[in-house]
Amino acid sequence: MKPKFGVVVFPGSNCDYDAYYSLKKVLNYNAEFLWHKEKDLKGSDVIVLPGGFSYGDYLRTGAIAQFSPIMDSVFSFAENGGIVIGICNGFQILLEIGLLPGVMLQNVSLKFVCKDQYLKVENNNTIFTNKIGKSVIKIPIKHGEGNYFVDEKTLQEIETNQQVLFRYSSREGLVDEKFNPNGSLNNIAGICNKNKNVMGMMPHPENACDAILGKTDGALIFKSVVENLFN
Amino acid sequence: MFKATVIVKRRPKILDPQGKAVEQGAKLLGFNNVKKTRIGKYIEFFVDTDDKTLAEKEVKEYSEKLLSNPIMEDFEFTLEEIK
C-alpha cells in the first residue's frame, strides 16, 4: 500500500512542486496538492507544509498562513496524532500556529544562505529519524530567517524531552558555532513536538531525494516516516 | 470611528541585526552619537465603531493574535477618535 502525502499550497509557496515531485516521482508515493482555502485533507496520511514565502512573508514568516482555512484541519489532524512535516516556511508556519515552540529570527548574518549543510541526527528514536541509519546527513538549506529562538525555559524543555531532531554540524557530526549557518540556539535545525508526530526543519529534504541532484539523504527522512506508518 | 496606531517592537533581549546594520550606516554618515538602534513595525488602521471599549478590545486582540508574536515582540497602541 502506498502512503499518501498531502502537500499544502499557500499563495507564495515555492517548494510545493519540489516536495510533490520528490514524493511522487522519485519516491513513488501518492501525493496530492491541498489548496490552502480548502478544509479537506483528502485522506492524507502525512501532511507536508512546504517551503516558500507564504503571503510574501509579510508581517512575519508564516504569520498570515496560520489562519488559512486548511490550517484548522491540519491543526486538528496534528492534535489527533496525524503526522505533519513543516519544511522551512512550513516550519515557520508550525511555529506561528503553535504546533511547535519558538520563533524564527533573521539570520544573524542578515544574509540569505543557500548551500548544502551537514546535520547531526540528534534523536534517532522518532518516526522521522529512526530509519535514517546515519548519524550525519547532508541536506540543503535556503533561507533568510532560520535563526531559531525560544525562551530559555522552553529551550530546556525541548532539550530534556529530546525534541531536537537535527543540529547544524560538521561533516563528522561535530556541533559547534562554526557550523551554525544562521545563529540558531543550540545549532537547532529541526525539532518535533512533545508527542513526536509534528516535525519542523529548516533544511529541505525534498531537495535531497533525486540522485541526479547529487544527494539523497532527504529521502531517508520520508522513508523513515513511511516505514513507521506501515509497521 | 477610531484610528488605531500599533507599534511592534522586538523585546529588549532579542538581537536586532537589522538595527545593528543600519547603525553602521549612521556611523558612516558621521552620526557618532547614535546608539542602540532598534527596528520595529508601525501599523495604522481604522476601527469602525463608536464604542471605545470595544475598539480597544479589538485592537488588543488583533495585536496579540496576528500583528505581534509574544515570543519575540512587544506591542503598544493608541486610539484616536475620528469625528
Image (spheres, coloured by chain):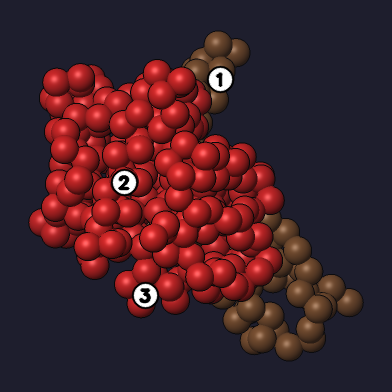
Residues flagged by tags 3 and 2 on a common chain: yes
Mark 3 touching mark 2, by CB under 8 A? Answer: no
Q: Which structural element holds mark 2? A: helix
Would residue A12 be visible to someone looking at this image?
Answer: yes
Which numbered disc, 3 or 2, marks the residue closer to the eye?
A: 2
Which numbered disc, 1 or 2, marks the residue closer to the eye?
A: 2
* Amino acid type of the residue that numbered disc 3 sits on in the rendered structure: Glu
Quarter containing the C terminus of chain A: bottom left
Q: Nearer the viewer, residue A97 or B39?
A: A97
In the image, residue B50 sits, relative to residue B14, either above or below, namely below
The image shows residue B76 at horizontal and vertical percentages of 55, 62
Label ID, residue B26: 1
Residues flagged by tags 1 and 2 on a common chain: no
Q: Colour of chain B?
A: brown
Residue at image position (36%, 77%) is A80
Report the chain holding disc 3: A
Q: CA distance from mark 3 to mark 2?
A: 23 Å
Residue at image position (46%, 59%) is A4
In the image, residue B8 sits, relative to residue A207, either above or below, namely below
Q: Which residue is mark 2?
A: A223
Q: Colour of chain A?
A: red
In the displayed structure image, the side of residue A6 where residue A46 appears, left or right: left
Q: Earlier in the sequence, mark 3 or mark 2?
A: 3
* Amino acid type of the residue that numbered disc 2 sits on in the rendered structure: Lys
Q: Which residue is mark 3?
A: A79
